[in-house]
Image (cartoon, rainbow, N blue to C red):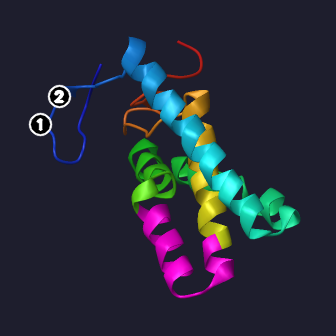
Amino acid sequence: MTATVLGSDVGAPLGFASGPMRATLRLEGAAAFATASALYVHAGFSWPLFALLFLAPDLAMLGYLIGARTGAAAYNVAHTTALALPLAIAGFLAGQPAVLAVALIWIAHIGFDRALGYGLKYPTAFGDTHLGRIGRR
């Protein structure tokens, strides 16, 4: 299978993590989930807020109603720690506990997804992820 991915050649083969690399990436996701959740508990943030917002990043899947390319882009933006981590740092440094709480929930969600094997999406189909194919073959 091939895909056109930002920064890659047209028709480049999809890269899927496998074997020990896939296991390591999933373990890394579990560690992110555990760490963000532990920090959330330590800060004494609201569990109802955690429950309310934990699945919020998955709303980005609605982009798939427009098409696979849009869906993958929206999903990937909502599922990258490159945005969630700076938000957490900003919330902490600015003394904004609500911002920090939202960022920790976001990081926990991303880590949970990765631990379950849900990776960043390729624009070919929802099931094509950097951690391998998910769903029906």
Vertical placement of residue 90 versus 101, above or below: below
Task: Write the residue at 65% across / 69% down.
Answer: 102
Q: Residues within 10 Å of mark 1 (few under 14, many from 20)?
A: few
Q: Which span is picked out in magenta?
A: 83-100
- Horizontal and vertical percent position of residue 137: 52, 12
| In this rendering, position of residue 125 left or right of residue 135 | left
Q: Residue at x 56, y 39 (%)?
A: 31
Q: Nearer the viewer, residue 27 or 136?
A: 27
The residue under the point 68% across, 79% down is 98
SS of the residue under disc 2? strand
Decide: is 135 above or below 65.
above
Quarter of the rendering containing residue 57:
bottom right
Marks 2 and 1 in Cβ contact (< 8 Å): yes
Q: Which residue is mark 1?
A: 9
Amino acid type of the residue tagged 1 in the rendering: Asp
Q: Report whether 107 appears left or right of 23.
A: right
CA gap between label 2 and label 1 equals: 5 Å
Q: Find out whether residue 26 is within the magenta segment.
A: no
| Quarter of the rendering occupied by the N terminus | top left
Q: Residue 10: x, y in percent?
A: 14, 35
Q: Is 46 left, or right, of 26 in this rendering?
A: right
Q: Is residue 76 visible?
A: yes
Q: Is residue 132 visible?
A: no
Q: Which mark is residue 37?
A: none
Q: Report helix, strand or loop for mark 1.
A: loop
Q: Quadrant of residue 47?
A: bottom right
**Residue at (53, 47) in percent of width and height:** 64
Asked if residue 3 is positioned above or below residue 65 in the image, the reply reads above
* Label disc, if present, on residue 12 of the rendered structure: 2
- Residue flagged by tag 2: what amino acid is it? Ala
Q: Residue furthest right?
A: 48
